């Protein structure tokens, strides 16, 4: 047989030969090759800081199993992105409040709608005065649910989504009073550098300290006039693992009642509503994600283990 015919025969045999099956592990190998190892390692650093509050690079290396040079590079990246900062010493690292944005929208809307909203509506019906539940967001307290529209005693008609100044509201004051020291300092520094209505007050740490001391002594946040001249308000925290998850307030008309009268008559049902929300979250099988109702430490980054947060008076 001539050389060209032999070549054609060999090619034909290759074309007709059954293809050998691909190894079962090949798709997994390709998937693994597409993973971004740096991202996985960065998340491991965030998780370790979330569970330990403060840590050195050496401690993070031991916790994550990553080499110390890699830990330093990841920390530099996270600091530049605004998620990590130095602690009281330059070799100590901690999370910033910015990491809370990583969990926004994951379980927050669900627990607010399914658990808190019905309880707030029930509270509004029983006390008649308008009441809100709000959560902290960057530089303000954001009203999430409200009974202003259904309360015959409301004169402001605020709606969900309204952003309330932290230091000028009962909601913000009670939140700051019971949050951890590191987070409180970060919030005050952010407000002091902002153009928010409470920026000047945030720069006066002595005045803020006196206000928060009164809140802790009373066991509730308070406001008389100010951002709403004809009304006052009191507020209590909804606590979860020794930190405020949200805050509930009640608005009243200053000419109708004193703050002391309001507290004497309505503080108990407000605290009962907060406790009801806390229990519902604790007993839930976590349909909203482990970040709220589960047993593991899966709170939004930076929210876990705030041992320095004072306990609310229930």
Image (cartoon, helix red, strand yellow):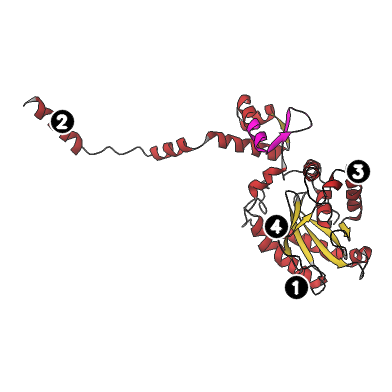
How far is mark 3 from mark 1, CA to CA?
Answer: 39 Å
Task: Identify the mark nearer the N-term, 3 or 4.
Answer: 3
Q: Is residue 27 above or below residue 171?
A: above
Does the image show residue 185? yes
Secondary structure of residue under mark 2? helix
Which residue bears the numbered disc 3? 206
Residue at horizontal 86 percent and vertical 54 percent from the top: 313
Magenta range: 75-95
How far is mark 1 from mark 4, CA to CA?
Answer: 26 Å
Q: Position of residue 108 (x, y in %)?
A: 66, 55
The quadrant of the rendering that contains the N terminus is: top left
How far is mark 3 from mark 4, CA to CA?
Answer: 36 Å
Task: Identify the mark nearer the N-term, 2 or 1.
Answer: 2
Residue at horizontal 44 percent and vertical 39 percent from the top: 31
Q: Quadrant of residue 54?
A: top right
Which residue bears the numbered disc 2? 10
302 drawn magenta = no
Which residue bears the numbered disc 4? 281
Left or right, 60 with reference to 168: left
Task: Identify the mark nearer the N-term, 4 or 2.
Answer: 2
* Viewer-side label of 2, 3: 3
Left or right, 48 with reference to 31: right
Task: Identify the mark nearer the N-term, 2 or 3.
Answer: 2
């Amino acid at each position: 047989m001539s050389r060209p015919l032999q070549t054609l025969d060999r090619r034909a045999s290759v074309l007709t030969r059954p293809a050998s099956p691909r190894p079962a592990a090949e798709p997994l190998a390709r998937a693994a090759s597409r993973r971004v190892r740096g991202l996985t390692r960065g998340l491991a650093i965030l998780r370790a800081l979330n569970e330990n509050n403060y840590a050195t690079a050496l401690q993070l290396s031991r916790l994550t199993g990553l080499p110390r040079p890699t830990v330093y590079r990841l920390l530099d990246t996270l600091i530049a992105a605004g998620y990590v900062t130095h602690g009281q010493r330059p070799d100590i690292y901690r999370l910033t409040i910015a990491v809370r944005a990583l969990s926004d929208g994951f379980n927050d809307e669900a627990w607010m709608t399914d658990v808190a909203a019905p309880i707030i509506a029930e509270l509004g019906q029983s006390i008649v005065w308008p009441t809100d539940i709000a959560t902290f967001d960057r530089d303000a307290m954001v009203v999430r649910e409200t009974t202003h529209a259904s309360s015959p005693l409301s004169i402001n008609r605020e709606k969900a989504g309204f952003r309330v100044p932290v230091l000028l509201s009962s909601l913000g004051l009670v939140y700051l009073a019971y949050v951890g020291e590191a987070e409180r300092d970060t919030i005050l520094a952010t407000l002091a550098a902002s153009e928010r209505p409470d920026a000047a007050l945030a720069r006066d740490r002595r005045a803020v300290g006196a206000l928060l001391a009164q809140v802790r002594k009373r066991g509730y946040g308070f406001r008389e006039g100010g951002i709403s001249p004809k009304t006052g308000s009191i507020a209590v925290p909804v606590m979860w693992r020794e930190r405020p998850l949200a805050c509930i307030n009640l608005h009243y008309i200053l000419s109708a009642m004193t703050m002391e009268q309001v507290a004497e008559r309505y503080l108990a049902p407000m605290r009962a509503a907060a406790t009801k929300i806390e229990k519902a979250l604790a007993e839930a099988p976590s349909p909203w994600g482990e970040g709220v109702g589960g047993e593991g430490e899966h709170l939004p980054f930076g929210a876990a283990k705030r041992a320095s947060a004072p306990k609310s008076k229930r």
